[in-house]
Amino acid sequence: MTQSKTLTPNQKKAEFIKLVGDEHNNQINSSNNRNSCLLIQFEAMSKKEFEYSKHYKEKDENGNDVVKKITLDTINGFKNSDITEFTKSWVDWCFFENPKGKWNSKENKNEWQVVRDSSVCSIAIHKASSEFDKPIIADSKLNKKGKILINNEFINEYLPNLNKDENPNPIYLSFSELKKVCLSWFNLPSTSSLLISKAPYINLPHSFTLFLR
């Protein structure tokens, strides 16, 4: 999926499932497949075809149960469990019409990891988009190497080592490079407060491990 396509929600689901399967069976096109997964997931979120939400109950001042709703926009400090819940919700959305072969974290570890990695990037880009005047994903088409064009300001802000030449233009990144930028966003105290409060000595590489599992 190196070229931009206009897909319906159901086509997005089918294409995403196919890409994850291709990734599992063929590592040669890994960056292409994973960046394509990200493009599909992020577009579905941007168009509100997929909206993450979770309902929970808590007691009001009179002791009555009150149902409340969590969305991406209401989460300020991310925990690993939030990423897991988001991943589950996305998988449910992809397999809603046809649950046959639906992935789970125990029996489909490789597929689950691909979805989780894509979700980490989608969440970070979605949440960080309001910080920048220009879109973080600068082009919905991948280049011939399967790399994705990313706003240089996002890179400079969260992982400037990837722009040592101080390129003033958007930069093509492999999926592994983009994931590092997004994980750096998660490492901020405002976005991963639980990790920081539990282990203030954690540096960036350790936070990678926490979010990758």
Image: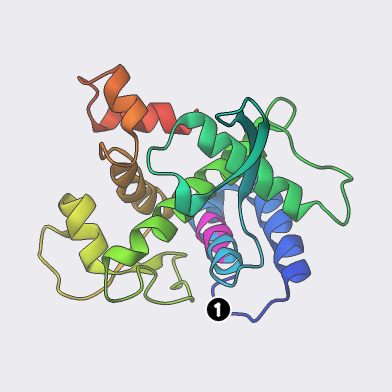
Residue plotted at (24% across, 23% down): 202
Which secondary structure class fits the magenta region best? Answer: helix
107 or 195, which lies in front?
195
Residue plotted at (33% across, 65% down): 130
Residue 80, x across and y down, in percent: 48, 30
Residue plotted at (35% across, 68% down): 136
The relative height of residue 33 versus residue 136 in the rendered view (above or below) is above
Say whether residue 193 is magenta: no
Residue 206, x across and y down, in percent: 31, 25
Residue 84 appears left or right of 146 = right
Of all residues, the one furthest to the front in this rendering is 62
Say whether residue 37 is magenta: yes
Residue plotted at (58% across, 60% down): 41
In the rendered image, which quarter is residue 49 located in?
bottom right
Residue 52, x across and y down, in percent: 61, 52
Residue 48, x across and y down, in percent: 61, 68
Residue segment shown in magenta? 33-39
Residue 26 appears left or right of 78 = right
The relative height of residue 59 versus residue 82 in the rendered view (above or below) is above
Number of numbered discs on residues: 1
Of all residues, the one furthest to the left in this rendering is 165
In the rendered image, which quarter is residue 170 located in?
bottom left
Task: Give the residue type at disc 1.
Answer: Gln
93 or 147, which lies in front?
93
Residue wearing tag 1: 3
Quadrant of the snapshot with the N terminus: bottom right
Residues packed near mark 1 inside 10 Å, few (<14), some (14 to 19) or many (20 plus)? few
Residue 156 appears left or right of 151 = left
Residue 76 appears left or right of 113 = left
